[in-house]
Image (cartoon, helix red, strand yellow):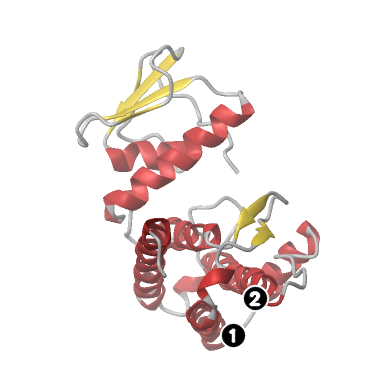
Amino acid sequence: MITPRDASDLAARQSTLALARQGTKFFGRELHSLTDDELDGDSLLPGWTRRHVVAHVASNARALGRLAQWADTGVETVMYASPEARNAEVAAGSILRPDALRRSWADSAADLDLRWQSLPADRWCAPVRNGQGAAIPLRDSIWMRARELWIHAVDLGHGAGFESLPGEVLTRLLGDIVGAWTARGDADYRLTATDSAHESYGSADAAEHVTGSLADLAAWAAGRGSGGVVSSTGEPSAAPRWL
């Protein structure tokens, strides 16, 4: 018998899965719009080419697949053996031939989705650990994947911006970021979106109030520039780290 809670959990999971699959298509369109030569160009992430971004997103899919395997079998399988192993995997992927790099991305995304589709419903609540070592239920990894896809599609730097992201992605992303700041106690901001019924994040008593469109606020909070945002203290400072 399906309880109301089960139905609610299923609906939430399906909604987030839809965001992840939409993100896969979005990233794929941005990737396929790049020529092989353009893959060698700089991304919006300092020190990374577009190749590094594609390799990272492919590596992320494989890492999350390991979490799904952990949840399914009960045998601990971490995302990465170490930060060094993660970096080495991205570096190795970044020097693949263009066709192999594109195939690596497509295959890793398809493999992860297949793992998700075949996972028994009761395994989504199984405890695993994210990349920071924190215990999470596996279902949270779906949003982790969606977030990676949407943000890094913008990081490819080929025309897509945060304004291209769905409102639900922007809202959840801002909630994540402000929540991380609050948990660490190292930031004192109030963020207000001027184009989203003045939706706000953070304490009303915060020392600094930052306003802008939902997309511009998300870009600033995620460390992707301060265009379009205004601070109560003058020029907006660089947003604190959130991951």
Q: Residue at x 46, y 12 (%)?
A: 207
Crowding at mark 2 (Cα within 10 Å: few <14, some 14-19, many 20+): some
- In the picture of the structure, the residue carrying the numbered disc 1 is 97
Which image quadrant: the C terminus? top right
Q: Secondary structure at mark 2?
A: helix
Is residue 86 depicted above or below 75 in this figure? above
35 horizontally vs 68: left or right: left
Q: Residue 63, percent across and down?
A: 65, 69
Asked if one can make out residue 179 in the rendered structure from this viewpoint, the answer is yes
Is residue 66 depicted above or below 135 in this figure? below
132 horizontally vs 183: left or right: right
Amino acid carrying mark 2 in the image: Asp
Crowding at mark 1 (Cα within 10 Å: few <14, some 14-19, many 20+): few
Q: Secondary structure at mark 1?
A: loop
Tell me where residue 70 sits by quadrant. bottom right
- In the picture of the structure, the residue carrying the numbered disc 2 is 72
Disc on res. 217: none
